[in-house]
Every structure is written in structure tokens, then in C-alpha cells.
Amino acid sequence: MILVLLAAAAACSPYDIDEVLLQRDEISMTLKGEVQFSYDPATCQMSHNSTTNEYHIFDDKLSDWFIVRCHERPSNEGQELTADVTWTASSSTRTMKGLTFRVEKVSGSGTIWMWCRQKSIGIVIKNL
């Protein structure tokens, strides 16, 4: 019984995907409920390479940024894909490779909301 409860607790994420990810309108990255980067069109840039499925989002000073390298193009709700994510965190750079993301939402304008349940990472990117 205890093993069943421990397994169930490990499978549950304490982060509400609706609150952490789906209510966000701006291009952004969250980790365990904390915003790591939020795109501001007045002070940030973004690029998208559709051949390599890479998304680069960065501030004008190049001091804060995140990069998502998808192993396939995210395009459909419910799609699962593998991606690598690199970002600035405080005074260092962090990288997580081989993460499984699920495309949770896609807008008509090309915005894509992706969630990595295992690491509680929310990504909002845009196909340009």
C-alpha cells in the first residue's frame, strides 16, 4: 500500500499546467512554476530556424535567453516530441537534453504551448 501511494505521489506534479503555462500569452519559459524568461517585444528578439527546429529567444543585451531545439517541428495539439533546452539562470547557463514535451495548445498565429511533465518545464514559442 505504501509503495502504491509513493508511486502515485511521484507521478503527480505540484504545478498546475493551466496556471503555469496555458494562461501565459507571451513567449516564455517556466521551470517548476517560476518564470525563467519572458519575452518583451520592446527589449527582446526571437528567431526560428524551421530547418533545424530551433527557437532562440533573447533580450537585447544577450544577458538573458533560452534556446529550444526540437527533434521535430511542434505543430499539433497532443503531439509528443523530444527537445533540448538551454537557458540563462542567475549567473550560469543550464542545459537539459532529451526532454519529452507535449504540445498542449496551438494558436492560429503560430504560438505553441509545450509542457515537459517530468521536469515541470513550460515553453511558449512561436513558429515565425
Image: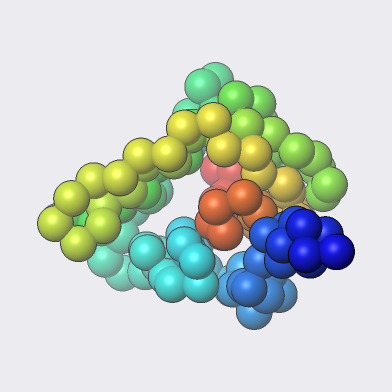
Foreground of the two, 92 or 22: 92
x 69%, y 34%: residue: 81
Residue 62 visible in the shown view: no
Q: Above or below — where is 50 with respect to 40?
A: above
Residue 53 in the image: above or below residue 30: above
Which residue corresponds to the image point at 37% horizontal and 64% vertical from the top-left?
36
Rendered location of residue 17, percent (x, y): 68, 69
Identify the residue shown where x is 26% and y is 52%. Answer: 88
| In this view, 58 is above or below 36 | above
> Can residue 81 be seen by looking at this rendering?
yes
Q: Is residue 69 above or below residue 17?
A: above
Q: Image quarter for residue 8? A: bottom right
| Residue at x 72%, y 47% (from the top left corner) | 102
Q: Position of residue 84 (x, y in %)?
A: 48, 34
Find residue 30 and report its horizontal and vertical position in percent: 48, 64
From the viewer's side, name the closer residue of 92 and 3: 3
